[in-house]
Image: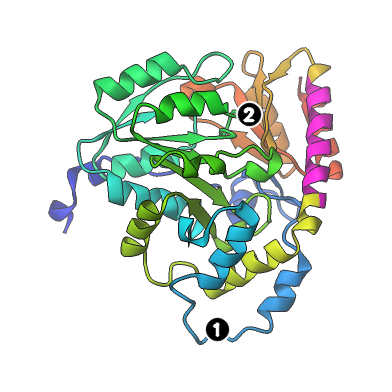
Amino acid sequence: MEKFVNDYIKSLKDYEPVESDSTLRSKYSLGNKEIIRLNANENPYGSIEEINNNLSKISFHNYPDSSQSELRRYLSEYAGVDEENIVAGSGADEMIELIFKIYGKKDDALVDLQPTFGMYSFLATSMGMKVVSSPRNNDWSINLKQTTDLIKKNNSKLIFIASPNNPTGNVLTESEIKILLDTGIIIIIDETYYEFCSKSSAHLIDSYENIIVLRSFSKWAGIAGLRIGYMLSNKNVINNVFKIKQPYNVNLAAEIAAITTLNNKDKLISNIEKILLEKKSLEEFIENNTKISSFKSEGNFILCKFNNNDAEIVFNNLAKEGIFVRKFSDNLLKNYLRISIGKPDQMNKLKNIINNSL
């Protein structure tokens, strides 16, 4: 069987997902210690209780609505765009994969604005595309001239821009987005962390036919385990996605959870406000520590740079106490840690361990 596997799949490096609690508990010999996950940008307050109440009333023996009619109606009201400009999927990751299936092909080039969300380059490579890195500036902003030059040189068709960017947290300005849109290629703005900054490019879909906006319920709504995200774009793009997506790609539980979330969004906004307050507290903590520096983040996380080899020391000391943050295998971020914002007691515990480690 192995001889039939595509060559670019054989050479594909495994994607590095967040490890499960059971894996972490075993790997770090944690016994009965509480595990505090500050490594996946998850909402520490979880989902709203109304979701469980509504799910208990649903019969799961029927297939979900493949046209997503009710869900799209709610998303239309929330996002402020017409229903015909919306399609939902099993997380934003599925939307990314469908974009590659529609617009990408073997030997095409993806210009990747590194460091950024690893799924873009992973899926491009899995299709036999080549990935061309366009490293960011020292402040993690995009080097526009370098990027546009690489787009032209490699005849690229599309580019993904996470805004806020994961893991750096910075947002692309509208003027920068318009410069990229004017290249004529497909610009995908990944707004997974939109609710933490309220800065969106969704209004541009009426003016540009080459923009796609992606959003997710994983981070702000606390339902990462149900996998639901959605795409905003012009009608032609949406129609092409409907052509190739699996008919029942959004399961019934995820659909009910998303609609319930949108009906109770004020409760979640209150939790977002708590997260942003705690982020400010962490920023102040870092400012008062000469051995750590950070970058302005408009997400629910902060990328921290440590002196010398302190990132590894801090990570290990946190892990011993059951606290997990994101470390990186990429040399570009070798002495960095990304810290997701947790509840006040979790963050206080984290700060104490960092202080004792440095």
Pick whichever, 65 or 51, lies toward us: 65
Where is mark 1, residue-wise?
60
- Residue at screen point 38% across, 37% down: 121
Residue lying furthest front: 207
Above or below: residue 91 compared with residue 108: below
Q: Quadrant of the N terminus?
A: bottom left
Residues shaded magenta: 270-286
Amino acid type at circle 2 is Leu
> In terms of secondary structure, where does tag 1 sit?
loop
In the figure, residue 203 lies in which quadrant? Answer: top right
Report if residue 47 lies within the magenta region. Answer: no
Q: For residue 296, which quarter of the picture? A: top right
Residue 16 in sight in this render: no
Q: CA distance from mark 1 to mark 2?
A: 41 Å
**In the image, residue 304 above or below residue 253:** above
Give the label, 1 or 2, closer to the camera: 1
Residue 217 got which mark?
Answer: none
Q: Position of residue 129 (x, y in %)?
A: 26, 38
Residue identified by numbered label 2: 337
Could you tell me residue 186's position as x and y percent?
36, 38
User: Disc 2 on helix, strand or loop?
Assistant: strand
Tag 1: amino acid: Phe
Q: For the stretch drawn in magenta, what is the main secondary structure?
A: helix
* Quadrant where the C terminus is found in the figure: top right
